Image (tube, rainbow, N blue to C red):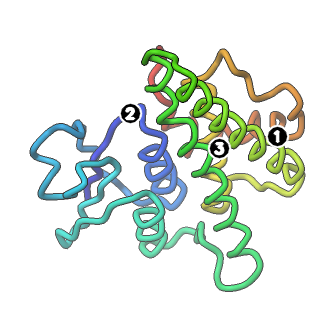
Amino acid sequence: MKIAFSPASPYVRKCTASAIARGVPLERWTVGTTDPALLPVNPLAKVPSLVTDDGVSLYDSPVICEYLDSIGDAPKLFPPAGPARWKALQQQALADGILDASQPRRREVALPQDQGRIDYIVMQQGKVARALDVLEAEADRLGMLTTIGEITIGCALGYLDFRFPHEPWRPGHPKLEAWYAKVVALPPLAETMPPAG
């Protein structure tokens, strides 16, 4: 089983962190989104994309992570039906939203800053700020990367550190900061740290 891999992608990190948490071996296939070799695997030419041992192509991190959760014997990251499942999925969606608001913003700051672009950046920053406030309010109830929600939150916070160190998220979020300091040392996050610089 192999995953189309980019070391800087937080969505790829989410998948590889999930695989580590579940003890599922993944071969990393380093491929760019402009590489024609990716097209037969994913017509959208995006990473992450997974090719299963049966040759089935899966794409988008929620789908890949749920597939990884369906194999192996380790405890599941996706809880069974009930309140715990909905909380984990809600947390995954919120943390994915942080990534969705942050990743494209990196490109925007490199372009000429007209008012429309400035307004867009401010809007995306607001989404991240509101999401961080929700996570701060819930930080006391976060576990040690035992659900897909917690893994995605860890990847989102790590991405903010990686790409936006000039916009620190820790001030005003002491409980979330304390939680992250504990989980970032665990194998799913420690072994998938994005490259420095």
Residue 149 spot, x, y in % from top left: 65, 59
Q: Amino acid at mark 3?
A: Gly
Q: Amino acid at mark 2?
A: Pro
Q: Nearer the viewer, residue 76 or 117?
A: 117
Instruction: Provide the residue designation for mark 3.
Output: 154
Q: Amino acid at mark 1?
A: Leu
At horizontal 86% and vertical 57% (from top left) the residue drawn is: 141
Q: Nearer the viewer, residue 73 or 13?
A: 13
- The correct choice, above or below, for 25 with respect to 55 in the image is above
At horizontal 49% and vertical 70% (from top left) the residue drawn is: 69
Instruction: Point out which mark residue 22 bears.
Output: none
- Residue at the far front: name it: 115
Badge 2 element? loop
Q: Quadrant of residue 64?
A: bottom left
Give the Cα separation between the discs numbered 1 and 2: 25 Å
At horizontal 42% and vertical 67% (from top left) the residue drawn is: 63
Q: Nearer the viewer, residue 70 or 160?
A: 160
Cβ atoms at labels 1 and 2 below 8 Å apart: no
- The correct choice, above or below, for 54 with respect to 118 in the image is below
Tell me which label, 1 or 3, sits earlier in the chain: 3
Q: Is residue 79 left or right of residue 32?
A: right
Tell me which label, 1 or 2, sits earlier in the chain: 2
Instruction: Provide the residue designation for mark 1.
Output: 176
Residue 52 spot, x, y in % from top left: 25, 66
Q: Is residue 145 left or right of residue 176?
A: left
Instruction: Point out which mark residue 7 bears.
Output: 2
Cβ atoms at labels 1 and 3 below 8 Å apart: no
Q: Is residue 122 left or right of residue 56?
A: right
Badge 3 element? helix
Mark 1, Cα crowd under 10 Å, few <14 / some 14-19 / many 20+, is many
